[in-house]
Image (spheres, coloured by chain):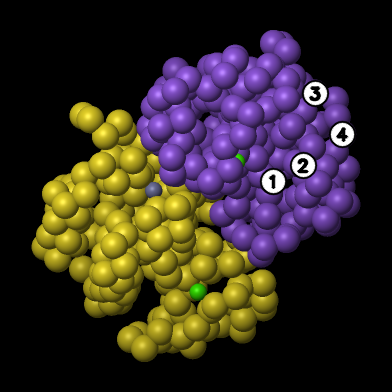
Chain colours: A purple, B yellow
Amino acid sequence: MLEQDRHGLAAALEQARKSYAEGGIPIGSTLYHSSIGPAPLDLDIALTHGTHGSSSELGKRLLLGAGHNQRVQKASATLHAEIAALEDAGRLHAEVYRQSTLYTTLSPCIMCTGAVLLYKIPRIVIGENVNFQGGEDLLRSHGVEIIVADDPECKELMAKFIKEKPEIWYEDIGLPSVQ
Amino acid sequence: MLEQDRHGLAAALEQARKSYAEGGIPIGSTLYHSSIGPAPLDLDIALTHGTHGSSSELGKRLLLGAGHNQRVQKASATLHAEIAALEDAGRLHAEVYRQSTLYTTLSPCIMCTGAVLLYKIPRIVIGENVNFQGGEDLLRSHGVEIIVADDPECKELMAKFIKEKPEIWYEDIGLPSVQ
Ligand SMILES: [Ca+2]
Ligand SMILES: [Ca+2]
Ligand SMILES: [Zn+2]
Ligand SMILES: [Zn+2]
């Protein structure tokens, strides 16, 4: 895995740990511009509507958005981690999404898969797909590049939560509590 | 079209008009429990996490959620009308979604299509799919019942907005402003 991808996924895992510490579902996500180095001038223009754009430490990529699942914290049915990261990024021009990479600690559900396809995000780095596998086939069929890190820390954190609060996890993926 | 479906779509159109009056994208959505008559006792239990459940006037169906596109109003990249309605409904048990109907003034994009599939909403009533056609084939392939109303008011309102502010509309569906 590329060094910048390790970094982007680590930032997503940090979001997941924050959510867990708050009693929430530990799934985190980040959206980075894919270019290394200072943001190109036209990206600054494209970001005029963005609310939180900031340069990241490592590799000087631009962090566009970051977030974690908010089901417990905000009683939210739609703020999955990936949606939260896209929401944090604010309004972006179509071109910016197409030059970005989405990081998520867990394989994206079909809603979040749809969000990636809506904005034509070309790359997604997935922490793990053992505890849950979402819309990877659909992403692949649309030409999205998928990197699965199979990260032990992502797997362990999610497995721990599912064991502790299975009913909240099932609710998050639209399944009845009694399986 | 069933009388309750006319009513559900009219409520979605009301949301769309509200958004237009605020300078926003005029797409609205509502989520109703599909049963006619008083909410069953187990639905009340299932709604314990819901934040806004209330009985509707006509047909006594339970209105679970309502909302409109918030791109302009909240600088939101993810609060499409359908997502806003689901968010308004709050946390619901899986069983409730599976007994509900989603109304939307415009054919749902792939993100909103994914949200319908995530929660296994079995029916969707679409105001029109002339100004935009989203993930109807994917919904159909998963067995979702689709009713397209081909409603003149929905069509007119959306066509007017696209003519007035094309760049905001393109942004909302992830397309560059210059087509
Ligand atoms: Ca941000
Ligand atoms: Ca509501
Ligand atoms: Zn998701
Ligand atoms: Zn949508």
Residues B143 and B60: in front is B60
Give the vertical position of A36 relative to A18 (above or below): above
Nearer to us of marks 1 and 3 is 1
Pointers 4 and 3 within a single chain: yes
Give the vertical position of B115 relative to B20 (above or below): above
Q: Earlier in the sequence, mark 1 or mark 3?
A: 1
The type of residue carrying mark 1 is His
Q: Can residue A147 be seen in the rendering of this structure?
A: yes
Image coordinates of residue A169 in percent, x first then y, are 73, 51
Q: Do callouts 2 and 1 mark residues in contact (Cβ within 8 Å)?
A: yes
* Mark 2 burial class by Cα count in 10 Å: few <14, some 14-19, many 20+: many
Pointers 1 and 3 within a single chain: yes
Q: Earlier in the sequence, mark 4 or mark 1?
A: 1
Nearer to us of marks 4 and 1 is 1
Quarter the N terminus of chain A occupies: top right
Q: Quadrant of residue B32?
A: bottom left
Nearer to us of marks 4 and 2 is 2
Secondary structure under badge 4? helix
Q: Earlier in the sequence, mark 4 or mark 2?
A: 2
